[in-house]
Image (tube, rainbow, N blue to C red):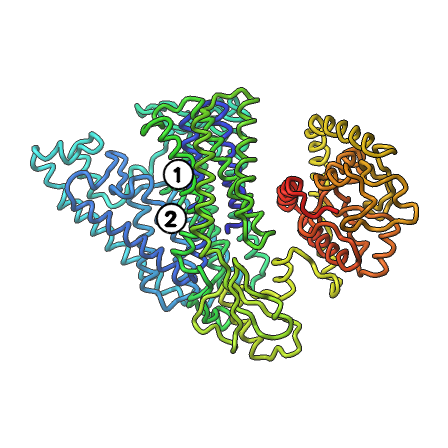
Amino acid sequence: MPPAWVWGSFAVLVLGMLLSAWGNHSAETLYQGIKITVIGLCCCIAWRLAAGLGWGARVSVLRGIVAAVVLVFLASKAAPSGYYIALGAAGREGSFLAWPGVIWKAGAFLMPLFLADMLVRPRYWIANGLAAAGCIFLVLIDGSRTGVLVLGLMILACGLLLAWRRDWAALSGARPALLLCIPALFVLLLLSTGIGYLSHGAAVLHPAERSRAGGVFGGHAEALMETAVDPIATSRLGSGDPQRVRLLEYGIDRAADCLPLGCGFGSTAMDPGYGIPMQVHNAYLGVLADFGVLGLLGMLGFIVAAVLPIRRVLARGAGGSWDAYFVAASAGAALAYLASLMLHTFSSEMSEWAYLIVMLAFAWLPAMQGSGAAGSGAAGQLGCYERRHSRWYEYVLLGGPFQIVAGLLAVAVLPAFLGWGGAFWRQMDPARINTLLAVGLSFLLITLTLRRLGQFSGGVFIAHIAPVVTTVFLVAFAVLFFSRGAYSRPVLLMAYAATLVWCYGACFVGGKYRRRKLAVVPLGETWSIQPRRNMEVRRLAAPDLAGVRYDAVVADLEAEGLAPYWERFLAQCILSHIPVFHVRQMRENLTGRVEIEHLSENDVGALLPSPLYSVCKRLIDIAGVLVVVPVAVPLMLLTALAVRLDSPGPALFVQSRVGLGGRDFRIFKFRSMTVGAESNGARLACKDDGRITRVGHFIRNTRLDELPQLWNVLKGDMSLIGPRPEQREFVDRFDAEIPFYIYRHVVRPGITGWAQVMQGYAGDADATRVKIQHDFYYIKHFSLWLDILIVFKTVRIVLTGWGAR
């Protein structure tokens, strides 16, 4: 997964575009937002693909790209008219695959990697020298002033890094490649000139060919030939561009007028004197005008994502490892691309973003398998095993980005096609825009929620599909309904049905691939890891995976019989990127409990709940109570009446319980037992307890007896979700019998909790010991996603009455 700065920047940028599309009812802005979303998914794919390659393989791929662009350009010059592109008197050249204004980027932004490879791997001096010559050639034929500036700054930065590290031996090793670059560049310029003259010189001599030769941009044959035989766009490199100043002034005025949400894509377009409308040549200003403040924050986030790897390299000091050159080159190229956007328009084309995606991926991924770099030594070698689902096509097909794209086509595009016709995108009115936005955002939220909930249920989420999908679509419908926004109800309902079919289909079809395959080291307590319906367990007879691909390896790292050869085997698995789990960690994941018998100081420290979510949870509690009060109050009145009519005594039962920080508070419940049930002392309820009244049985099974505790939640004594509070007498007893028992008071007690939905009622010390393990698991994984899972499980328990006494 990309680092948080990268995917967070994509998320903020897309959110700004979606809000701008919604505020301006702009279908074009929505379309651009979808394109950027796809680009973000491609960024995730690039991370996965690059993760399996070393620096040597990465640089080899880039060499192939530069060679392909150069060869296609030279071939286009010799091809019939239409394949070779020239911008007339400006002197800019390109081809049908890389137009003028784009072709230079393949040279300027890939050049730093070749310079780094010259320093690190001097034995590849021929390949790197030719690649560097190709990069300079592409910049010169395009005549890009920005490209020349980027190249100069990249070479200067490389020299400064070299001087800072005092690595003069690396510079000496790079000398052959640098010397080869000069004659190779000269040969490329001669080839370009010769091919241009032979292919287009006849257009001047034969008038019949003039219109065809100069017909691409409406120029003359003489101008086309002059461009084709000029190896360097000298006229453009030596001239200025005053029209950009007019665009910049207009863009500033538009940005000021369009705050805070922006005016939609293309709001800065004007004719600066070229006869065609153009957008402001400053991507950041254009994004601010088009997509508002959020759009600009997203773009600035990419700058931070490019700076952080450089900061990491500098923090290593002058004696850092060899891959510092590659990381600095990649991050520097990404930063150079972002700086070049100060002089260019904002684009959502993959041909523009591909350079940034690749360079950020390289900058955040250190050297991996097959690097082949000098000086890497044994540390650069990976293990001989292969992790399950680690091949590139498995990464792509089973990865989240591909599944999201395919899912959006199934749940958003297909219902739109059925409801609005085959060309629905040609008439994007506010109703269609709002509907597609609601469906797309709902599907993304559903996918994220199901993945998160699966982490707390052993990877099984089929039981959560219907409630999650229904809840999210109900919220989307409520937002559209109460905001009085136009939307298409039939398409929204079809999208709801399509989402259910997609999620259940993915669950059944992909069950085989999601079924985990674990290799277990047969020592210590690993006998407790047994096969399950969604998990295959194989016990190893020897320290070798025998060619089988596994998801993870489980071992008892504290076992006395863990011999050195087993330890080397585990280290080899880690180097092969196969996770190695301690048996206790795996049991925790499978059972939803944290074992308390062998907690160490570090384990206790890891159980501290998040302070930030504690504050957010308190706000959620208050909001949740206010939302359910209109429904809860009538139920409470009916319940109180039933309790009074069923048996003598008050409707409410007030008792002292222990809450946050071990402090006592008064809890309110509907009375479910006879008056004086605890006159002989407090004792836990048991099955078929004679103290429970007839109405008491019903309100206990349906949990209606807990409704008065909403008042405790408002007061701050309790939370909606948390460990159940106990009486002081029980707390003192269990504290003496169960280690770390009082640690459960580090969070507010709740009306429902993880132990209640996983175990039910605890009637003795042994059951309470298991209950505490569930409480510790809740505290350790204290998060919004676990609370959502508890809510869904609580609804199921209320409907079935499971676990009540």
The residue lying toward the viewer, choosing from 336 and 167, is: 336
The residue lying toward the viewer, choosing from 12 and 540, is: 540
The residue lying toward the viewer, choosing from 478 and 73, is: 478
Q: Which residue is mark 2?
A: 108
Relative vertical location of residue 663 with respect to residue 389 in this rendering, above or below: above
**Circle 1 residues within 10 Å: few <14, some 14–19, many ≥20:** some
- Which residue shows up at 61% across the image and 58% down it? 590
- Which residue shows up at 75% across the image and 35% down it? 707
Q: Which residue is mark 1?
A: 409
Relative vertical location of residue 298 with respect to residue 117 in this rendering, above or below: above
Which amino acid does the dot numbered 2 rest on? Ala
**Circle 2 residues within 10 Å: few <14, some 14–19, many ≥20:** many
Q: Earlier in the sequence, mark 1 or mark 2?
A: 2
Report the Cα–Cα distance between label 1 and label 2: 36 Å
The residue lying toward the viewer, choosing from 539 and 314, is: 539
The count of marks equals 2
Which element type, helix, strand or loop, lies under badge 2?
Answer: helix
Measured from the top left, where is residue 7 in percent x and y? 51, 44
Q: Residue at the right extreme?
A: 680
Measured from the top left, where is residue 518 in percent x and y? 52, 65
Measured from the top left, where is residue 646 in percent x and y? 81, 33
Relative vertical location of residue 699 with respect to residue 306 in this rendering, above or below: above
- Residues at circles 1 and 2 in contact by the CB criterion of under 8 Å: no
- Which residue shows up at 64% across the image and 71% down it? 525
Which amino acid does the dot numbered 1 rest on? Leu
Measured from the top left, where is residue 153 in percent x and y? 44, 48
